[in-house]
Image (cartoon, rainbow, N blue to C red):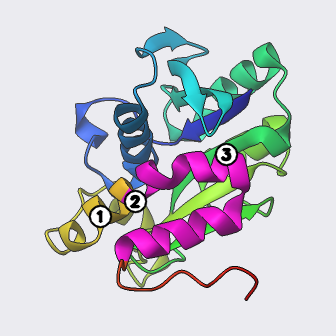
């Protein structure tokens, strides 16, 4: 079993904010692949099903961002899911808007949701980092991430979220490199895939 976590804050007030892009991606994965219904569990909303030939639990913690680790740790321990089988989708102010990076492990880089997970489980889970850009001044980071996405963000956000949802089974089955390659091909379909053996 794999645990896939989208980070965000619960409630209508935060629904369209930059900090909730993990929830947005989780909802898109849920719709795209017909996972089971959301149900309240582990201080979050949980849906189960199959992706990439593996059983998955898709989790949206409802603890507010700063306590995300409480929900994630409950689910991981209940299902006995290793950190290496856990994927967390989150916003990243250190990446330009619309950029995507996937890595295993690393620090929290000031992200309170990651800091909470790190404290309770450790750092060696996979992170799908969705760039939202930086306001330019450290003091503006908190209001910036808690603002709704801008009109300009609509140029990149829906296509990227759709690509993540479409390609996510590849991340589960084949790993990060194949996943990011597939997303690049979805977003720029005129690029040719390399021939076998090259």
Image location (x, y in percent) of residue 182? 52, 67
Find out whether residue 168 is within the magenta segment: yes
Find residue 188 and report its image quarter: bottom left
Disc 2: which residue: 163
Mark 3 vs mark 2: which is more N-terminal?
2
Q: Pick out the residue farthest to the front.
A: 196
* 133 sits left or right of 178 in the view: left
Please tell me whether mark 2 sits on a helix, a strand or a loop.
helix
Disc 3 versus disc 1: distance between alpha carbons?
21 Å
The residue stretch that appears in magenta:
163-187
Disc 3: which residue: 172
Image location (x, y in percent) of residue 110? 63, 62
Disc 1 versus disc 2: distance between alpha carbons?
6 Å
Between 179 and 160, the one nearer to me in the picture: 179
**Residue located at (46% from left, 47% from top):** 22
Q: Determine contact: label 1, label 2, CB under 8 Å.
A: yes
Disc 1: which residue: 159
Residue 28 appears in view: yes
């Amino acid at each position: 079993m794999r645990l896939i976590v989208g980070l965000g804050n619960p409630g209508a007030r935060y629904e369209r904010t930059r900090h909730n892009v993990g929830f947005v991606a989780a909802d898109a994965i849920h719709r795209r692949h017909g996972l089971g219904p959301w149900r309240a569990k582990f201080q979050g909303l949980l849906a189960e099903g199959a992706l990439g030939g593996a059983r998955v639990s898709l989790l949206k913690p409802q603890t507010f961002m700063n306590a995300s680790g409480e929900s994630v740790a409950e689910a991981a321990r209940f299902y006995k899911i290793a950190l290496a089988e856990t994927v967390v989708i989150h916003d990243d102010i250190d990446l330009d808007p619309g950029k995507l990076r996937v890595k295993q492990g690393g620090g929290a880089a000031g992200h309170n949701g990651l800091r909470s997970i790190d404290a309770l489980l450790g750092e060696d889970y996979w992170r799908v980092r969705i760039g939202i850009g930086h306001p330019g001044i450290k003091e503006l980071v908190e209001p910036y991430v808690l603002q709704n996405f801008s009109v300009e963000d609509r140029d990149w956000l829906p296509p990227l979220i759709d690509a993540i949802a479409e390609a996510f089974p590849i991340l589960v089955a084949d790993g990060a490199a194949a996943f990011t390659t597939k997303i690049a091909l979805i977003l720029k379909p005129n690029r040719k895939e390399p021939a076998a053996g090259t």
